[in-house]
Each structure stands twice: as structure tokens, then as C-alpha cells.
């Protein structure tokens, strides 16, 4: 067993199963592996020095591009809907329409703000966005070994790309599925492109992108990283899947949610702000 799997943050329902999956993947070789990861609160930190770190949306909410009136409205939406997102007493069926409502209302407010594309880089620069400790190793190692990394996010693609670009890790093996902004000819936000991706429709998002998974059909071994139960469906488009190892970050409402995370993720990382465990697994696989 990998030493890092004994870290105090690691919880597993069935350590033997994890061991077996890892063994099969090592045997198949790293050229059969692909990584699918969520972005907000999975590749980025949940908190730093006791303070919450921003999601892609929060980076905009907190920025100079938003009027104080709209910032207030966006904060109210966050205060209303985030507790619903992490409420373990409600079912996905109950939460789904409310999540659609959150994303839709927030995007409408953002569009009203006439956000300029040329200011996004400075807004990300000035934000408190932070990738998890060990991100450099994760991105560089995957690149070095030509392992594809799909970042599948219900956040905002333009913002998340800027975060990883500024961190110097937007390598050519990285592909992003997310909500992208649509700008008019003068570079002002006019809408969001395509089908909305929210926290509970990643399966539908995956199935819309069959071309990507077709290209990766020689890689039936998947490492999935997420922080929400909605992230578990990110790999639903993978063709002829052989093995999947699901690693879930449990950042908030730990006691209430631990059992459901243990039931659905193979490895649960409790209040772990680092990528130490995923990195140890990748080093083991390559
Ligand atoms: O990248 P990921 O799929 O994790 O992005 C979704 C996250 O963005 C959600 O966990 C949600 O809390 C957050 N969000 C937000 N503001 C919104 C909508 C979603 O912070 N308006
Ligand atoms: Mg997330």
C-alpha cells in the first residue's frame, strides 16, 4: 500500500478495492490512463489560513468588474443556495432545480455587468484564487508523461483557464469543459455559450462531448478527482472503461456528509488542502 494512503486525512470504505484498482492500472500502464478532474474546491483550495478561497464565480463576484449592488445580489444568492448545495438531508432531485436557478440567476446578473474580456486576467491576478498545494507536480507530471487531463467544471471556463495559465500549468495535455463567456465584437460579455453546466448535470455534459472521449478510447483507466457528489458522473462519457479510481475531497459539513462520500468515492480526503495523495498515486502509476 502507498504510504500516503495512511495519511490522517485519508478515509476508505474498502482499502483492498483501492489496492486492486491500483494494481490493475499499474499493470495496464500509464499510457492507458486519463485523469478527469473537477476544478473549484478540487484543484483549488477550499480554505487558506482559516479563510475561504474563491470559486471561479466568486473571483468575479468579489472583483472590481461588479457594481456593489450586484455584488450584494450575488452574495445573497450564494448565502441562499450554497447551504442547499451541501445539504445532505436533501436529495439530488430536490436540489437540481434549485441549482439551475442559482446558476441561471447568477449568470443573468453577470451579463448585466458588461464585463470586459480584457480585464479578466487582472481580476484573476488580484484575486485570492489558490490552487491546492502540489498542483505544480500534478500538472507537470501529467504533461511529462503525456497523460490527458480533462478539467470538467461548472465554474467559468474563461476564469479557470486564466487561473491555470497564470500558474504556468496550462499545458497542451489539458482540456477544459466548462461554462464559457460569449463576448460581443467590442469584447463585452453578452451571454454564456452553449448548454449550462451546473453541479448536477456533468453526466449530460460528458455525453455531449463524445468526440473527446472517442479520441481517448485507448485510455480506459480513469483517475477521477472531485469534491461534490455531482462530480461522480464526470466520467460517464468514457468509452470501454476498465478501471476507475474516484478520489473525493470532503471540505465542508464533514460529519454529515462523510458516510455518503465513503459510499461513493473510493478515497475520501477529509479537510485535506493538498494534492499529496493524488500525486502519490500518479507517481505510482508512472
Ligand atoms: O468547478 P466546479 O464544478 O466545482 O464549480 C462549481 C462550484 O461553483 C460549486 O461548488 C458552487 O458552490 C460554486 N458556485 C459559485 N457561484 C455560483 C454558482 C456556483 O460559487 N453562482
Ligand atoms: Mg467543485
Image: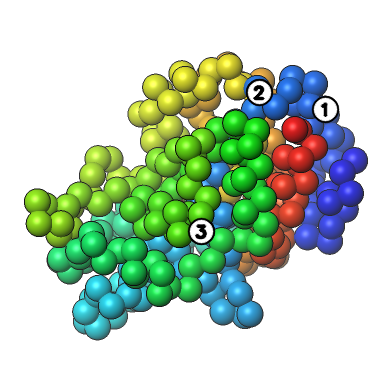
Q: Closer to the camera, 262 or 142?
A: 142
In contact (CB < 8 Å): disc 3 and disc 2: no
Residue located at (80% from left, 37% from top)? 284
The mark closer to the camera, 3 or 1, is 3
The circle drawn on residue 277 is none
Q: Earlier in the sequence, mark 3 or mark 2?
A: 2
Q: Residue furthest left?
A: 185
Question: Dot 3 corresponds to which residue?
Answer: 167
Q: Earlier in the sequence, mark 2 or mark 1?
A: 1
Q: Look at the picture and state if 238 lies above or below 166.
A: above
Left or right of residue 7, residue 78 in this image:
left
Question: What colour scheme does the image use?
Answer: rainbow
Q: Distance between the residues labelled 3 and 2?
A: 26 Å
Residue located at (58% from left, 17% from top)? 218
Left or right of residue 3, residue 228 in this image:
left
Residue 103 visible (yes or no): yes
Question: Dot 1 corresponds to which residue?
Answer: 23
Q: Closer to the camera, 22 or 204?
A: 22
In contact (CB < 8 Å): disc 2 and disc 1: no
- Could you tell me which secondary element the residue under label 3 belongs to? loop
Question: Dot 2 corresponds to which residue?
Answer: 31
Q: Which of marks 3 and 1 is nearer the N terminus?
A: 1
Amino acid at each position: 500500500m502507498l504510504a500516503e494512503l495512511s495519511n490522517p486525512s485519508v478515509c476508505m470504505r474498502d482499502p483492498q478495492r483501492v489496492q486492486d484498482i491500483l494494481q490493475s492500472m499499474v499493470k495496464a500502464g500509464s499510457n492507458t490512463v486519463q485523469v478527469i478532474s473537477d476544478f473549484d474546491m478540487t484543484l483549488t483550495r477550499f480554505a487558506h489560513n482559516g479563510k475561504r478561497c474563491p470559486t471561479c464565480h466568486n473571483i468575479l463576484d468579489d472583483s472590481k468588474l461588479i457594481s456593489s449592488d450586484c455584488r450584494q445580489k450575488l452574495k445573497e444568492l450564494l448565502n441562499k443556495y450554497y447551504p442547499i448545495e451541501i445539504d445532505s438531508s436533501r436529495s439530488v432531485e430536490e436540489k437540481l432545480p434549485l441549482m439551475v436557478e442559482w446558476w441561471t440567476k447568477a449568470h443573468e446578473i453577470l451579463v448585466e455587468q458588461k464585463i470586459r474580456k480584457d480585464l479578466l486576467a487582472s481580476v484573476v491576478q488580484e484575486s485570492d484564487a489558490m490552487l491546492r498545494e502540489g498542483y505544480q507536480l500534478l500538472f507537470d507530471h501529467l504533461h511529462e508523461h503525456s497523460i490527458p487531463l480533462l478539467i470538467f467544471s461548472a465554474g467559468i471556463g474563461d476564469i479557470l483557464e486564466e487561473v491555470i495559465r497564470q500558474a504556468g500549468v496550462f499545458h497542451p495535455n489539458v482540456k477544459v469543459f466548462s461554462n464559457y463567456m460569449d463576448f460581443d465584437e467590442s469584447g463585452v460579455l453578452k451571454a454564456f455559450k452553449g448548454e449550462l453546466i451546473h453541479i448536477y448535470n456533468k453526466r449530460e455534459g460528458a455525453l455531449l462531448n463524445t468526440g473527446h472521449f472517442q479520441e481517448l478510447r485507448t485510455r480506459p483507466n480513469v483517475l477521477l478527482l472531485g469534491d461534490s457528489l455531482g462530480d461522480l458522473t464526470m466520467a460517464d462519457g468514457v468509452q470501454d472503461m476498465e478501471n476507475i479510481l474516484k478520489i473525493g475531497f470532503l471540505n465542508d459539513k464533514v460529519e454529515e456528509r462523510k458516510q455518503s462520500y465513503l459510499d461513493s468515492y473510493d478515497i475520501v480526503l477529509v479537510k485535506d488542502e493538498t494534492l499529496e495523495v493524488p500525486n502519490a498515486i500518479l507517481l505510482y502509476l508512472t
